[in-house]
Image: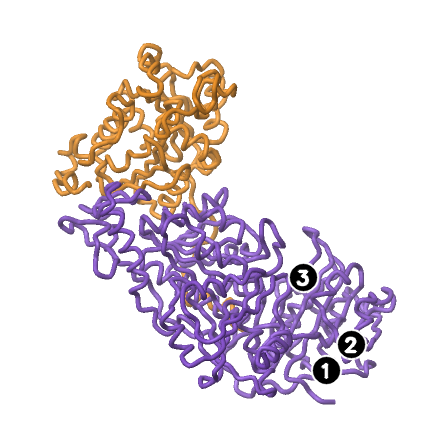
Chain colours: A purple, B orange
Amino acid sequence: MQSARSVSVVLAGSGGAGVMTAGNMLLEAAAHAGYYALMTRSSGPQIRGGEAAAMLRIACEPIECMEDEFQVLAAVDWENVQRFNAEIPLGDSSLIVGDPDQGNPPDVFLKSGAARASLPLKKIAKSVPEGRANMVLLGALAALLGLPDDAVARAVERTLGKRPAALAPSLAAVAAGRAAAAGIAVRFPLSPPPATRAPRWLLTGNEAAGYGAIKGGVRFVAAYPITPATELLEWMAPALAQVGGTLVQAEDELASVNMAIGGSYGGVPSLTATSGPGLSLMVEALGLAVAAEIPIVVVDVMRVGPSTGIPTKSEQGDLNIAVHGLHGDAPHLVLAPNSVADCLGTTQWAVQLAEALQTPAIVLSDQFLGQARSVVDRPEDFPGGCSRVTAGAGTPGYKRYAVTESGVSPMAIPGSAGLAYTADGLEHAERGTPSSQASDHFAQLDKRRRKLTAHDYGARWADVEGEPAADCAIVTFGSCTGPVREGLALAAPDGVKARLISLRLLAPLPALQLLAALEGVQRVLVIEQNQSAQLYKYLRAECDLPGRATSLHRPGALQFSPGEIRRHLLEWSRA
Amino acid sequence: MNEVACNAAPAPAMRGPNDYKSDVKPVWCPGCGDFGVVNALAKAMAKMALEPKDVAVVSGIGCSSRIPAYMASYGFHGVHGRALAAGTGLKVARPDLTVIVTGGDGDGYSIGGNHFLHACRRNVDMTYIVMDNRVYGMTKGQPSPTTEPDWDSKLSPDGTGLREFQPLVIALTSGANFIARGFTGDPNGLAEIIEQAVRHPGFSFVEVLSPCVTFRPEQKEWKKIVKADALKPTADMTRAARRLLRDTGFELGVLYAGERPPYAPRGPRALRTPSELEARFAL
């Protein structure tokens, strides 16, 4: 049987069936076996105990997105599992594994033409003392994929380490599942993993962003829970305490952002995290941070909007509010990580830039990046530390908002003698005293813009890849980058060649660097996941894109898949 | 704006109240009650010999919220209604500072009402001074939560018909650790109350009757109505609550001085370097 360099598997079942636990173990087992892997999850609308699906992709190369089809759909039972139909595309070479005692798989899955295999999961589980059907399924899937015993055992041991009584029955159930799978003729063996293995990490984008914030120097966080940003804050709560920082739970997002501004005014790099509805509440305070020149980072883990939208699904619909949502002329930073691992580096960079430029930074992550659990190469180390320019105690004639060449003025930190000033959202003169003079307004507006536009952002403004000599280019950002990169590779055998520019710095838009990267290009395709082509319109407004610039955009809930991108690229290349 | 006061930097014991004021001229109307709060605050700071560099006065928006710029300490003049949130973040991040949050009745009880409730129950060690004149003055005369229901105005002809907000009741039931009422016509009494409030651990709330001579000229009569030292401090919440049942709104003094420990971060705090956190991700 031919082996594959990438295999995708779904574990599904009703609430309490333990498919998430089994999915996490399979993910970790793949990692122990030397593979890269990615897991997303979906669950019913119930707060607790609803049907759930763990969707995994395991591969020999690093992966940033799911595939177009799943090879295996395996369910402990089928109650309401058809709900996930749109998220679980199957093909006629796929396999549906089910327990015959739990009825037939839903028609929506059968009509794919997938093969079927029966495993009496519950009966097998009953044959093992304290055995559970989800562990039987784990063993069966490990056998179908050819994952070695020791990798699975290590994953089970790591997960159940705190509950040794559950360990032996679980391992026995896994072994029983593996034995039972011997009767299944269809297999999906993975090709051998890469021989050399650099250190790998298993983490979500939310966790990566939390760690990036700490590496960037954040030591104060104000938190208000919101899906899908909550885990970022929950990860930071104990971690921040361990590095001597503090997290306080706020009463709402108005409070959390203002608390963070208060903490940063006190000299402590500060952050909050939220999603669309929370960001909407925060924009007034972000304007204050712009005017009073107080650094702060807001991680917006975007979800489907508008309003409450679909809290558990991803969309890149907050670009407009992030870039344009503040009233007045309020230049600030907007950055976007383009992979699970990059949530670390980009959040760290956002903290450093906010500190250096004394302005708010919005990090546009999204539900996919934030909640996808991924096996990645240990991310590259970027230099740590903060670089807020502070004023020395007793500086004679100190002016907090002095108009400097760079636009950055040394900030007095409370506790420093002789520098007392009032940080103010009112327009002010250089000393910080309120002013309604046009001349002060011009000078302060100008310095606040200049400090952002004059800054040297270096090479990290984007990831520029693909064929450097190609006369076509794709511009994208965030979680679209993974499927676009893979879709471009899939289209290459059909002659599609293009440069790929994944923007990490969205505001201020590095127009000069972008135009240089597009030098000589005849056609530009802007790809993003929202209904109104927000990035496309923003780029068209900010710079004169060369050649014929078109847009590929559609709203969220479902991520772009590599095959979907490939189909569009083929059309684009012929048009 | 504060260089003059700060650069003069007399020794702490030598500082007088004027050393705690900046050289910025207030925008307030002549006769505004808020001048009395500047004086009382400066007096209290001098009495406590606070270092201006270690004090931050935080506010939102409104006439009274202009006060940070008039003090020689650090100031923060933020957005409308969020002063307590900014003050909370500052104090939690910088526990070494003395944080005094200031503002008016509209800022604190209307747009910022939710933060008032939660600041009381969170009990962070800071002081909240509300200059209550029962009117929005900066926007030229609209009813606030503490305005009498029948007060006629352009925005609410014949009055709002709404019951007044009860700041002391809300503070007590929400968990403020120190609750008092002062009057700007009695700057010495007010200074004493502010000093006690700042010294008391936890969240201290001082409601200050501060007349608006422009839009509520009838408030000039308050000096005849207030009753000095009518409220006596107790740590017994039940006694304080009973006292409030017969409150007219013009009794001055300390109502409640509780013994609840102030907010402190909880949970394990074993110190690590950031890179030690990477063990959580390593396979």
> Residues at marks 1 and 3, common chain?
yes
Q: Residue A188 carries which label?
A: 1
Please report whichever mark, 2 or 1, sits nearer to the chain's N-terminal start: 2
Q: Is residue A103 above or below residue A447?
A: below
Classify mark 3: residues with Cα within 10 Å, few (<14), some (14-19) or many (20+).
some
Q: In this view, does B115 lie above or below A265?
A: above
Please tell me whether mark 2 sits on a helix, a strand or a loop: strand
Q: How crowded is mark 2: few (under 14 residues within 10 Å), some or many (20 or more)?
A: many
Task: Report, in whole angstroms, how far the alpha carbon at label 2 lies from the one at label 1.
Answer: 9 Å
Q: What residue type is labelled 1?
A: Phe
**Residue A331 picture location, percent across and down:** 36, 56
Q: Which of marks 1 and 3 is nearer the N terminus?
A: 3
Instruction: Kindly indicate whether the residues beneath marks 2 and 1 are on one polypeptide chain.
Output: yes
Q: Position of residue A221 (x, y in %)?
A: 43, 52
Mark carried by residue A42: 3
Q: Please report, as a chain letter, where disc 3 is located.
A: A
Q: In the rendered image, which quarter contains the N terminus of chain B?
A: top left
Of B6 and A301, nearer the camera is: A301
Query: Label 2: which residue?
Result: A95
- Tell me how far mark 2 sits from mark 3, CA to CA: 20 Å
* Contact check, label 2 and label 1, Cβ < 8 Å: yes
Amino acid on which the number 2 mark rests in the picture: Leu
Quadrant in the picture for residue A351: bottom left
Label annotation for residue A500 = none
Q: In which quarter of the image is residue A487?
A: bottom right
Q: Position of residue B66 (x, y in %)?
A: 30, 34
